[in-house]
Amino acid sequence: MILHKSNNLTFFTPNQINGLGAPFFDTGISAGFPSPAEDFKEQRLSLDKELIKNKEATFFARVSGQSMIGAGLDDNDLLVIDRSLEPTHNKIAVCFLDGEFTVKRLKVNKEGVWLQPENPHYPIIKITDDNDFVIWGIVTNVIKKV
């Protein structure tokens, strides 16, 4: 379900599925030589249980733009955002800034708060009293297509 769409992010609420989850092989996937097939032990895995710690405070948002590519957040990636987590220095946060949502790394010290992009082509944003600014949630995971 889409909750909100802005130029930079589209927000979704997670759908709770009562199924058993997808098959999960607990042996790991070799990136080198293949492992023997008899070592595979199948279990069930729920991505909701793996990625969502507080379901009432968790949302998804799709990234639009390139300002966070250095942090591995690419255009069209799906972010898992937890609104119950404390925003602290160096966390990646979804913020509401002057009427738009944006995702940036928080830089916090005694002199103030900055929103740090992870792309040198984008400016660092200093938050001032003149800004309409709210830290909306903390990014906990990113889901990518390959």
Image: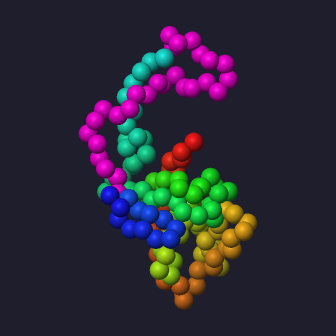
Q: Quadrant of residue 106?
A: bottom right
Find residue 68 and report its horizontal and vertical position in percent: 62, 61
Residue at 42% across / 68% down in the picture?
5
Q: Residue at x 67, y 73 (%)?
A: 124
- In the image as oriented, which residue stretches furthest toward the right? 120
**The C terminus is located in which quarter?**
top right
| Highlighted magenta segment, given as a residue range | 13-39
On screen, 38 above or below 58?
Answer: above
| In front of the other: 131 or 23 | 23
Queried whether the magenta region covers residue 72, the answer comes back as: no
Percent position (x, y) of residue 111? 65, 79
Residue 28, placed above or below residue 15: above
Q: Quadrant of the N terminus?
A: bottom left
User: Going by the image, does 80 lie left or right of 2?
Assistant: right
Front-most of 50 and 142? 142
The residue under the point 52% across, 22% down is: 27
